[in-house]
Image (cartoon, grey):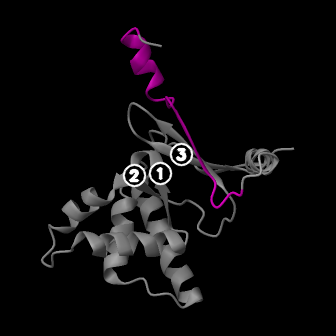
């Protein structure tokens, strides 16, 4: 039996990303207050930059955007902020891209799967417990201990499929 939960879908054309971003930031502030964690100004700014779109962003892109500010951030500072945001469950790392994206359900526990469009770079997050359980079971059958489970699936989103067909590609 599989329980699919769409955590962060691909954005539709009428998607209000400003509302999406504001909601994520408010959730992070509330969660940090409840946990007694500190969402510093830099951590908040990094989270804002991650949530600028549903396209995963690399740490050095974040660093470049932070350089527009009066106080210059160093790479280790950005990585520490990203590590904090990951530990708190506010962002995910897309390993194949070495990039980060916002988590649509910070309180969600368990493995996540990511659908990543190879043309536009947008990503959607789903949590299918059945997939996670089956992968864990197969790993145990091979006497393998799973430390972390993130599944990345690459393909084409609905917005990019028509463009690809027009160019005569499949």
Label 2 crowding class (10 Å Cα cut-off): few <14, some 14-19, many 20+? few
Task: Reply above or below: 94 against 48.
Answer: above
Query: Distance between the Cα atoms at labels 2 and 1?
Result: 6 Å
Q: Earlier in the sequence, mark 2 or mark 3?
A: 2
Tell me if mark 3 has few (under 14), some (14-19) or many (20+) residues whose alpha carbon lies within 10 angstroms of its own: many
Residue drawn at x 40%, y 69% as measured from the top left: 82
Q: Are marks 2 and 1 in contact (CB under 8 Å)?
A: yes
Q: What residue is drawn where x is 39% and y is 53%?
A: 99
Figure quadrant of the N terminus? top right
Q: Which residues are magenta?
A: 145-168
Pick out the residue farthest to the top.
Answer: 168
Residue plotted at (45% across, 56% down): 101
Residue 43 lies, in percent from the top left, at: 37, 76
**x and y, in percent, of residue 86 in the image:** 50, 68
Q: Say which element carries label 2.
A: loop
**Is 159 contained in the magenta span?**
yes
Residue 15 visible in rendering: no
The residue indicated by pointer 1 is 94
Decide: marks 3, 1 in contact (CB < 8 A)?
Answer: no
Q: Secondary structure at mark 1?
A: strand
Is any part of residue 94 visible from this angle?
A: yes
Circle 1 residues within 10 Å: few <14, some 14–19, many ≥20: some
Question: To which residue does mark 3 refer?
Answer: 124
**Mark number, residue 98:** 2
Q: Is residue 56 above or below residue 170?
A: below
Q: CA distance from mark 3 to mark 1?
A: 11 Å
Q: Is residue 39 magenta?
A: no
Disc on the earlier residue, 3 or 1:
1
Q: Secondary structure at mark 3?
A: strand
């Amino acid at each position: 039996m599989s329980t699919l939960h769409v955590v962060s879908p691909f954005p539709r054309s009428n998607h209000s990303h400003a509302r999406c971003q504001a909601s994520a930031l408010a959730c992070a502030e509330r969660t940090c207050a409840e946990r007694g964690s500190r969402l510093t100004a830099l951590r908040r700014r990094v989270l804002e930059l991650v949530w600028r779109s549903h396209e995963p962003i690399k740490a050095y892109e974040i660093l470049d955007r932070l350089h527009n500010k009066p106080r210059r951030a160093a790479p280790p500072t950005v990585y520490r902020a990203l590590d904090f945001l990951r530990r708190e469950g506010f962002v995910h790392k897309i390993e194949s891209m070495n990039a980060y994206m916002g988590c649509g359900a910070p309180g969600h526990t368990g493995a996540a799967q990511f659908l990543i469009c190879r043309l536009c770079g947008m990503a959607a997050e789903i949590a299918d417990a059945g997939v996670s359980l089956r992968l864990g079971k197969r790993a145990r059958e091979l006497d393998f201990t799973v430390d972390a489970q993130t599944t990345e699936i690459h393909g084409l989103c609905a917005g990019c499929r028509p463009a690809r067909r027009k160019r005569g590609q499949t």
